[in-house]
Each structure stands twice: as structure tokens, then as C-alpha cells.
């Protein structure tokens, strides 16, 4: 029978705290130091391990404030006010004002935050998980027929975000195996003017829909500027089958309504 071993087993079964376990092992060693020659060796591991844990927990509690920020923490919130936008309901209660508000705020956010700078304004760091998404700007070939580009050497500009992990860049809380990648690629080109832009009278447009004075105020000889870069879903035929857009020159310089602030 080994009484020292029995006392150690009883001590472990009481599940003391790390600091209490260390002190109890030191007491056992002190009592058995002259009666059992191996008492220090048999108790040193059981004393040092909980002591190391206690010291590590103490340092972690002291220095945790230096490694964890307490502001702008990202948390997952479950709320009945979060979800997808009901556009039908939104439009019925003034969705125009809603979209205009976010359109204007989105534009100002883009100007403020999408800068080629290492330091950004404070508002850029408190809205999204990523203040701005990475993208590359390169030159590319003409996406249309050669006659629709004004230059032959790299006539278009390509803005490409590349493949972005949705969870990392957009803050969606999804599992790694369910993660998807999003890519936005935009190619822009300056269209030639040439014969694509004309100024004609209203009478020449025939039954083509116009965006000038509302009926019955259409004037026969009212000047219109027309842009012919390909027909729209109205599928026109005849001389205006390639008409893209037209606007009254008179209505662009007149106010048909007024408001107050």
C-alpha cells in the first residue's frame, strides 16, 4: 500500500482549482519529504502543470485588452427586422424615396471610400466588413464591332473584381463548405459620335415613343436629339429601328414643375 499515492488520488478526485492543486501538492511534498524518498519527483509534475495553467490564465486576463478590440465588434444578430427587401411593399409606401436615399448615400460612400489610399475616412471603417472591395483596372479589346470603338489600340477599359469569397468580403455567416465566390466584371468603351447622333424634328420620328413634352403638348417642329446605337425592347421597324433614345431639346431647357424645401 502506497499512502502517498492514495492521498494524491483523493486530491485529484476533489477537482480543486489549479492554484489549490499546486498548494496541496506542495503540502504533500513537505509532509512526506523525509518519509518517502521519491515524494518530490512524484509530485513535481502534478504541481507544475496546474501552476503553469494558473500563470497563463493570469497573463491572458491582463493582456487580453491589448489584443482584442472592444469597438466595432462583428456579431451575428437574429432579429425580426432583418431579412430580404419586399420591393412590392416598398414601392407602395414610397420606395422611390427609399431608393433615392440609398442611391445618394451609396454614391457619396463610393467617392469617400474607394480611394487608392492606405488611410480612409472614419465612416468607411464602420459600415461594411470590408471597407472596399479589391478590383483591377486593365485595358481590353473592343467588345463590339470595330466601327463602334474610337481607337484601335486597347479601346476599352475593364474593371474586374476577380473571385471574391462571399463570407470574407460580404460578411455572410456561412459554413466554409457552403461558401461561394462572386465576381463583377465591367467593360466600358467610348462610343463614336459620327452619324449615331442627329437632331431632327418631332414629325420625323413618326410613332416612335418620345421623352419630351407630354401629350397633347407635343409640337410638330419640336427639335429632338436622337441617339442611334441599337434598338431597345420596343422592336421598332423602319428608319428608326436602331433608335436607342431621344430627348426634346426644348424640354431639357424648361421646367415643367416646381417644388419647395
Image (cartoon, rainbow, N blue to C red):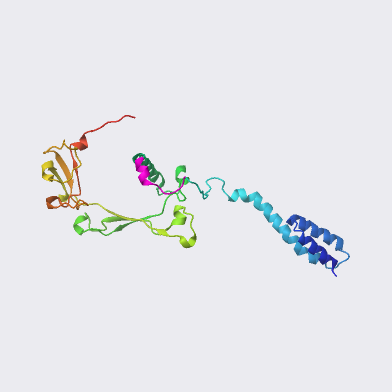
- Residue displayed at 66% across by 49% down: 62
The quadrant of the rendering that contains the N terminus is bottom right
Quarter holding residue 52: bottom right
Nearer to me, 207 or 164? 207
- Residue displayed at 17% across by 43% down: 225
Nearer to me, 10 or 227? 10
In the rendered structure, the answer to whether residue 3 lies left or right of residue 97 reads right
In the rendered structure, the answer to whether residue 27 lies left or right of residue 124 reads right
Any magenta on residue 214?
no
Image location (x, y in percent) of residue 210: 18, 43
The quadrant of the rendering that contains the C terminus is top left
Q: Which residues, given as a range, are shown in magenta? A: 81-92
Image location (x, y in percent) of residue 186: 32, 55
Q: Is residue 83 visible?
A: yes
Nearer to me, 241 or 47? 241
Name of the residue lying farthest toward the right: 35
Image location (x, y in percent) of residue 144: 23, 58
Name of the residue lying farthest toward the bottom: 1
Quarter holding residue 136: bottom left
- Residue displayed at 35% across by 41% down: 92
Nearer to me, 38 or 260? 260
- Residue displayed at 86% across by 60% down: 31
Q: Is residue 99 visible?
A: no
Amino acid at each position: 500500500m502506497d499512502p502517498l499515492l492514495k492521498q494524491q488520488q483523493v486530491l485529484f478526485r476533489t477537482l480543486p482549482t489549479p492554484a489549490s492543486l499546486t498548494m496541496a501538492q506542495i503540502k504533500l511534498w513537505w509532509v512526506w519529504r523525509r518519509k518517502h524518498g521519491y515524494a518530490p519527483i512524484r509530485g513535481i509534475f502534478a504541481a507544475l502543470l496546474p501552476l503553469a495553467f494558473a500563470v497563463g490564465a493570469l497573463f491572458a486576463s491582463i493582456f487580453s485588452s491589448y489584443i482584442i478590440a472592444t469597438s466595432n465588434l462583428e456579431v451575428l444578430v437574429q432579429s425580426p427586422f432583418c431579412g430580404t427587401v419586399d420591393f412590392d411593399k416598398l414601392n407602395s409606401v414610397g420606395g422611390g424615396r427609399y431608393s433615392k436615399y440609398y442611391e445618394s448615400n451609396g454614391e457619396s460612400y463610393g467617392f469617400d471610400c474607394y480611394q487608392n489610399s492606405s488611410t480612409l475616412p472614419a465612416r468607411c471603417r464602420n459600415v461594411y466588413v470590408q471597407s472596399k472591395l479589391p478590383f483591377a483596372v486593365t485595358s481590353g479589346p473592343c467588345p463590339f464591332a470595330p466601327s463602334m470603338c474610337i481607337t484601335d489600340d486597347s479601346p476599352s477599359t475593364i474593371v474586374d473584381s476577380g473571385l471574391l469569397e462571399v463570407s470574407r468580403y460580404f460578411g455572410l455567416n456561412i459554413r466554409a463548405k457552403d461558401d461561394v465566390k462572386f465576381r463583377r466584371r465591367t467593360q466600358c468603351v467610348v462610343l463614336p459620335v459620327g452619324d449615331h447622333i442627329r437632331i431632327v424634328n418631332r414629325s420625323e420620328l413618326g410613332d416612335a415613343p418620345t421623352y419630351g413634352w407630354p401629350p397633347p403638348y407635343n409640337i410638330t417642329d419640336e427639335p429632338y436629339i436622337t441617339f442611334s446605337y441599337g434598338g431597345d425592347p420596343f422592336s421598332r421597324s423602319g428608319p428608326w429601328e436602331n433608335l436607342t433614345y431621344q430627348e426634346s431639346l426644348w424640354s431639357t431647357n424648361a421646367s415643367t414643375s416646381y417644388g419647395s424645401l
